[in-house]
Image (tube, rainbow, N blue to C red):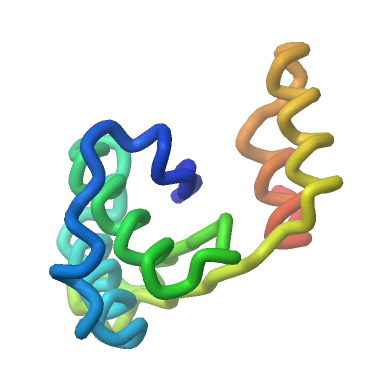
Amino acid sequence: MVLELEPSRMGQPLDGQRFEALSIDYIARLGKEMFAADPQAHRKDPERARRLCYLLYLKMPRINAAQFFNLGTNGKPDEVDASFKSLNEMAMGMMYQQQQQGQLDAQKVDHAVWQRRAA
C-alpha cells in the first residue's frame, strides 16, 4: 500500500480531536484488520484507506510511508505485518521528480522506500 499521508490532499479531514485518545497500536490494528479482510483494500476502498492514513498522520506526523503486508491466507489481522517509515525530503523530492517525468513505478517506490528489489 502506498498512500499520500498529506492531510491537505485528503478532502475533508476527520476531526483530529475526536481521535486523540486512540493509540498507535490501536490504529495499526485497524489497518491490519482492513488488509486482512482484503489485501487490495487501498484500491477497492481508497476513501477508507485515506482515513487510515489520516489517523496514522495524527499519531505520527513524521511518517510518510505505511505498508500492510498480508503474510497469511486466513484473513486474520495477526497475519498482517505493519511497517511505517519516515523518508527524508530529498528522497521524497527525487521520487516526485521521477513521477512528474513518468519514470516512477511501483517497483521503484518499493525499492526507494523499503529497500527491496523485485525478484
Residue at the extreme top of the image, as rendered? 101
Above-or-below relation of 46 to 78: above
Q: Residue at x 41, y 37 (%)?
A: 8
Q: Is residue 48 left or right of residue 97?
A: left
Report whether 84 appears left or right of 92: left
Specify the quadrant of the image occupied by residue 45. top left
Residue 119: tell me if it is visible.
no
Q: Is residue 98 or residue 57 the one in the foreground?
A: 57
What x and y, as percent, mark residue 63?
56, 64
Q: Residue at x 21, y 54 (%)?
A: 38
* Residue 56 vertical position relative to residue 9 in the rendered view, above or below: below
Q: Position of residue 116 (x, y in %)?
A: 74, 59
As drawn, 85 above or below 4: below
**Residue 99 x %, y %:** 70, 22
Residue pictured at 77% horizontal, 12% vertical: 101
Q: Residue furthest front?
A: 17
Q: Is residue 42 above or below residue 30?
A: above
Q: Nearer the viewer, residue 80 or 91?
A: 91
Viewer-closest of 90 and 84: 90
Name the residue at 30% across, 63% down: 55
The tally of labels here is 0
Residue 51 in picture, x, y percent from top left: 24, 51
Q: Give the camera-side residue of 41 and 84.
A: 84
Residue 113: tell me if it is visible. yes
